[in-house]
Image: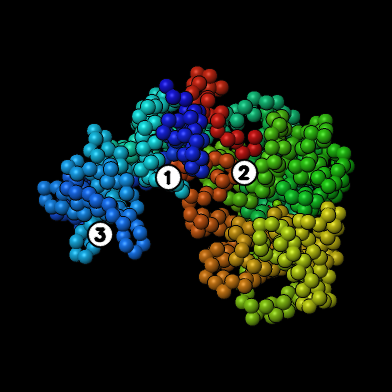
Amino acid sequence: MFDLRTPIENLYLVGPARAKILKRLEIQNLGDLLFYFPRAHQDLSKITLISDLKPGEFSNIKAKVLEIKTFRTKVRKLSLTHALVGDETGSITCLWFNQPFLSKVIKPHETFLFSGKVALEKNKLQLQNPIYEQEKPEQIHTKRLVPIYSLTAQITQKQLRTIIKTYLDKVTLPEYLPSQITKAEGLLDRNSAVHYFHFPPNYSSLQAAQERLAFDEIFQTQLKVLQYRKLRQRQQSAQISNGPLLQEKIKRLPFQLTNGQKQALSQIIRDFTQAYPANRLLNGDVGSGKTILAALALWLIAKSGYQGALLAPTEVLATQHYLNLRKFFEADGISATLRTSSHKSEPGMVNIGTHALLEETVKFSKLALVVIDEQHRFGVEQRAALKNLHNTHLLTMSATPIPRTLALTLYGDLDISLLTELPAGREKIQTELVAEPKRTETYKFIKEQIKAGRQAFVICPLIDPSDKLEVKSATAEYEKLTKEVFPDLKIGLLHGRMKFEEKERVMQQFQNKELNMLVSTSVVEVGVDVPNAAVMIIEGAERFGLAQLHQFRGRVGRSDFQSYCFLFSDDPNAPDNPRLQAFLNSENGFELAEKDLQIRGAGDLYGTEQSGYHFRIATLSNLDLVQKSRDYADALLTQDPKLDKHPLLKQIISAQPQVHLE
Ligand code: ADP
Ligand code: MG
């Protein structure tokens, strides 16, 4: 019996040199090899008679070798091998380049299957570089649905196919799904599914194999995610309820909450009344007003005698939240602190900061709620900091739209609240792609806006992934604008390389309207909230992704002033750029995400990449399948919470990536 974890270099037929090549395909062990599925199949199941061959077609013949010879061309010294082969209807020449050893393998009088492209040369048909294989009880390379794999240099289809087939024949994969499920769903057994995905006897068995393995992928994810959800629900947390106190605070807000906000808030605080830690996602488009809900939740926690934390993915955003919210808390005697890697302070009742807040050196005595803003922006290291929050209520916030299937799989451990409307009174943001000759005119318009009291952002393009160049472009733009374009305006500069105090000062000045304009790199992308800013200028717009552009534009239009978003680009093709066109035509984040998906292709579904889960077979478009596998996973975990009765399944699940916030 072979162990699927056997390193690839220990396999006979592979060895160290070939192992290196296979590792480039992410094949590390036997299991990876067997699960390295073909990207397509070529249908060579039909044998064509030589007299029926047609030029241009890829065909498969069965023929006897009449003669074979290898010679060198005079001009370029290529080796050419010619074989004349025939069946009962005629004969044809097979031609190979630079494979002189063939005349030792393909011998006269023997019969082979040859598959290749039929070409017309000097009025005669030829098979060029055909695949050849002797007739056997089971063919691998010809006369069947032949698997086609994604390759890398120094390995051929034939070689990889042979290695995979050899080990498929030696291994029988045990079943791990309960038979009620495979029966009820009419699923193929696991062993056949893996075999048939590579070497299917026909198309319908190929499809059955893919269906079974797609089910496995989604089912495994569901088990992992639901197991985590149930684990959290067995933990203890602070139980908090004080609706009337919170209503009192809500009445003192400078604005009315929208109905959507009220509903989401009631879901959030209902979670707190339970004995186990909440895990909720607040999902709403840019500008929909998520922050105030987080603040109210933190306020309630603090008023109930517990500590809370608000985590932001960047220092800029953390600082801004602190500056904006400090008074909201301190007005009611709640201490609020800021903590980032460069700004330390002792914990208070409400603690705002980056993931530096969760370093082990920070000691909370009664932390009951952690809010994570712009969850999708958190990196791996930052996520790791969230790992031990088993007993605290969690509220994550994100503007990234999450399709329903994704919500049920990758985000399936979370409860979700949706904010579908923007606060009332918001004007539509006027978005325009400005042609270079109109730049001066546009600058004039911006100046008028500033005279009328508004403020403007200028975002500089990402020239290179290294932020060195980004800083340089922002600095150069800042110089140009202060010296040449707007010498009488007060302009600030913000980029990631600045010291914390400088960043904080600039942000504060912009917030206090001491600056008319803020030139910035993409650091202002997420979450920055300065309602008086009504102009957003994006330089090099074609270099940004659709989600990012949407985030930038979301920095304006946060009050009842008419706001503007001007895009500049030195790419002459910008007006035809599908991303920019989509952006000009829609202001709706959900719509733009759909468009983005279309433009980038379905293989790149947002959210899956960063989650660590790669669905290789399943597509998340099948809501029915997702829902069904969730129900099965739920039922199984109810009977067998730790999967002790399903050891094989347990082992496979534990090898899966962590759920997204664990
Ligand atoms: P996001 O959901 O993108 O984080 P914010 O929380 O930053 O959005 O809110 C955007 C702006 O809308 C802020 O200036 C906020 O004060 C304001 N706001 C939030 N809720 C309301 C409301 N119900 N009515 C009016 N303005 C609101
Ligand atoms: Mg926000």
Which numbered disc covers residue 119?
3
Q: Which residue is mark 1?
A: 155
Give the quarter of the figure containing the N terminus.
Answer: top left
Q: Establish whether ligand 2 lies closer than 8 Å to the Cβ of label 1.
A: no
Mark 2 / mark 3, whichever is N-terminal:
3
Q: Is residue 550 left or right of residue 185?
A: right
Q: Residue furthest top?
A: 645
Does 650 sit above or below residue 508?
above
Q: Which residue is mark 2?
A: 417
From where the camera sits, is residue 215 visible? no
> Mark 1 and mark 3: span between their CA atoms?
26 Å
Q: Nearer the viewer, mark 2 or mark 1?
A: 1
Crowd band around label 2 with a 10 angstrom C-alpha radius: few (<14), some (14–19), many (20+): some
Does 404 sit above or below residue 235?
below
Label 1 sits on what residue type? Ile
Crowd band around label 3 with a 10 angstrom C-alpha radius: few (<14), some (14–19), many (20+): some
The residue lying at 79 percent from left, 64 percent from top is 493
Name the spot of residue 659 as percent of width and height, x first: 60, 36
